[in-house]
Amino acid sequence: EAAPASAPHSGRGRGRRPPANESIRSLMIANLPECVALPLDHPLAGNDILDMRDLKNEKFIAMARSISCSGFESIIQKSLAAGFEAQIVAQVDLLPTLMTMVACGQGISILHRDMLPRSNGRIAFVPLRSVSYFRRWLMWDINNDNPCLQPLIALGHKWQDDLEYPVE
């Protein structure tokens, strides 16, 4: 997701700080736990929290590695750390496709919590225990004189103040 340095944008990353540049400033505007996305009728859907080890016999649906390498690799790495190799039965190019497949019981997935509203109540989101958080950054170039930039930065500060899961 590269954007010109002079353009404000929402940079995404899994726990890493954005690259340093003297004229670039950033604010973390989201710090979201990763969740297991499950069909509503799945036996684990009613749990308050899940451990990755609870998912060892599940079929996984992932965003295609070419679309979201970090998301795909996250499933693999989390499963290996939990002592099993995730059985990824489908890779999809679009998030609505992934959510539809989960809702229809074709498998489960790992998504960050702000995907919940996009599910339209068709799938359950159960937080994963002891996982990394998905962080979203607002980045801008201090030399950008676009009049919309200052109101956007002010909004970024509000989002930062309202983080549901503040950084420790």
Image (spheres, grey):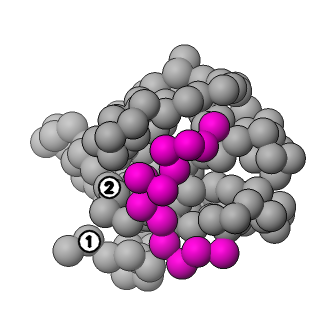
Q: Which residue is mark 1?
A: 167
- Region in magenta: 46-59
The amino acid pointed to by label 1 is Val
Image coordinates for residue 110, horizontal then vertical, percent: 54, 48
Q: Residue 50 magenta-drawn?
A: yes
N-terminal of the pair, mark 1 or mark 2, is 2
Residue 26 found in image quarter: bottom left
Report the residue at 64% width, 55% height from top. 37
Report the residue at 32% width, 40% height from top. 83
Q: For the stretch drawn in magenta, what is the main secondary structure?
A: loop
Q: Which residue is mark 2?
A: 132
* Crowding near the residue tagged with mark 2, few <14, some 14–19, many ≥20 C-alpha atoms within 10 Å: some
Report the residue at 56% width, 56% height from top. 36
Res. 54 visible in picture: yes
Q: Secondary structure at mark 2?
A: loop
Q: For the residues marked 1 and 2, what is the alpha-carbon distance in whole angstroms?
A: 11 Å
117 over 157 or under it: above or below: above
